[in-house]
Amino acid sequence: MFKDFRAPFTRSNKKQTEGSQPAAMDTSYSFQDKSIREASVIAIANQKGGCGKTTTCINLSACLAKKGFKVLIIDLDAQSHASLGIGVDVDNLSYSIYDVIVKNLELEHTIVPTYIKDLDVASASSMLTGAQLEIADLLGREGILRTSIYKMLNTNVKNYDYIIMDCSPSLNLLTINGLVAAQSILIPIQTHYFSLEGMKELFSTMKIVKERLNFQLEIMGILPTLFDARTKMNRDILLEIKDYFKDKVFQTVIRMNIKLAEASLNKKSIFDHAPGSNGAHDYSALTEEIVSLTQPGSGIEARFAKEGEKIGKIENF
Ligand SMILES: Nc1ncnc2c1ncn2[C@@H]1O[C@H](COP(=O)(O)OP(=O)(O)OP(=O)(O)O)[C@@H](O)[C@H]1O
Ligand SMILES: [Mg+2]
């Protein structure tokens, strides 16, 4: 299914290929570079629709920015919900991630600021729907975004502490580009409905990506969302999720909170729309967890080393 790009990630002085062709995966950018190590690149993915990926992307990113980190949201969903939900006027943008993926445009040209200081967005556009077909035959198609991100970071054109990607509810080529670019994946799972069967496809895709395209990919955490403690079904499913994924489940559980839905409609983060709400409390707690996981010395690597395993049961799929 995928080409094997497990080339050694060493820095070279190789000149970049110029021209109108989309960039193939470029191995001259290394995770060992200082600027790259400083950025945490996180993909929020689950092919199950409506499980809170975009809500998590917006509010986690907003909270990180409000804490003083420099944050970039990369919107990989043609629906552009992450861009719209934080107030970006997607219809009036000159460029979008489509131009990066298909036209070989540098990522920095698609980046626009949001109303929150230190929070930028590389917006999606409806044209992304067709992007997959346009790059289907391209050698290195799975690594286009990775190359673009690391080129931007490596050349210090723009620098970020966190780059958070909002993936679409599909394991399409754009989501694969997100997984190949990411150091870790955050998987929201709604506590209304949990099916291991439904997760198999995601884990087997991750396994292939990890083996062939991005050996550094780790699970940052499984995030239970849309939790309603009043229903037994929700409580049972939460227990089931914790029982199965154990330490990989975040301690934070995102409760059902209508203010979160209202905030997106008002194109604001929950911290600006309803700062005293349960939604603001939960996303603030999640942000604390993620900051502590991504700080030097207490990172995901340390966590997995402690557990003595890589992606555990997920490897068994
Ligand atoms: N904790 C919550 N409480 C109440 N509503 C929520 C919560 N989280 C998300 N929602 C709402 O549920 C809907 C789906 O959430 P969201 O768009 O974040 O999911 P998604 O996984 O990104 O969906 P898709 O797969 O379509 O991209 C939205 O209307 C959102 O406002
Ligand atoms: Mg979404």
Image: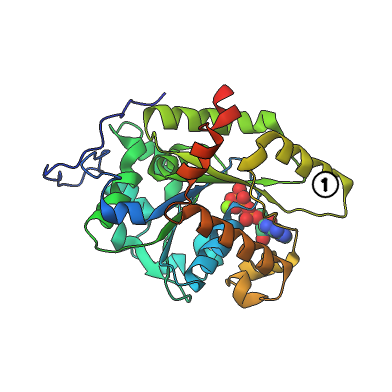
Q: Residue at x 37, y 58 (%)?
A: 96
Instruction: Choose between 170 and 51: the one closer to the eye.
Output: 51
Q: Is residue 207 left or right of 153 when viewed as pictured?
A: right
Q: Is residue 237 above or below residue 265?
A: above
Q: Work out whether residue 106 can be spotted.
A: no
Instruction: Choose between 285 and 157: the one closer to the eye.
Output: 285
Res 38 → quadrant: bottom left
Q: Is residue 268 left or right of 92 when viewed as pictured?
A: right
In this rendering, the count of numbered labels is 1
- Ligand 1 sits in which quadrant? bottom right
Q: Residue 271's spot in the image, x, y percent?
A: 61, 73
Q: Residue at x 42, y 45 (%)?
A: 182
Q: How is the image coloured?
A: rainbow
Q: Residue 275's spot in the image, x, y percent?
A: 66, 76
Mark 1: which amino acid? Arg
User: Quick one: quadrant of the N terminus?
Assistant: top left
Q: Is residue 241 left or right of 159 when viewed as pictured?
A: right
Q: Residue at x 87, y 50 (%)?
A: 231
Q: Residue 210's spot in the image, x, y percent?
A: 43, 32
User: Quick one: quadrant of the C terminus?
Assistant: top right
Task: Note whether ligand 1 is within 8 Å of mark 1.
Answer: no
Element class at badge 1: helix
Q: Is residue 294 above or below residue 307?
A: below
Instruction: Choose between 188 and 112: the one closer to the eye.
Output: 188
Instruction: Choose between 236 and 200: the one closer to the eye.
Output: 236
Mark 1 Cα-neighbour bin, 10 Å: few <14, some 14–19, many ≥20: some
Q: Residue at x 54, y 26 (%)?
A: 315
Residue assigned mark 1: 235
Q: Residue 74's spot in the image, x, y percent?
A: 43, 56
Q: Work out whether residue 172 can be spotted.
A: yes
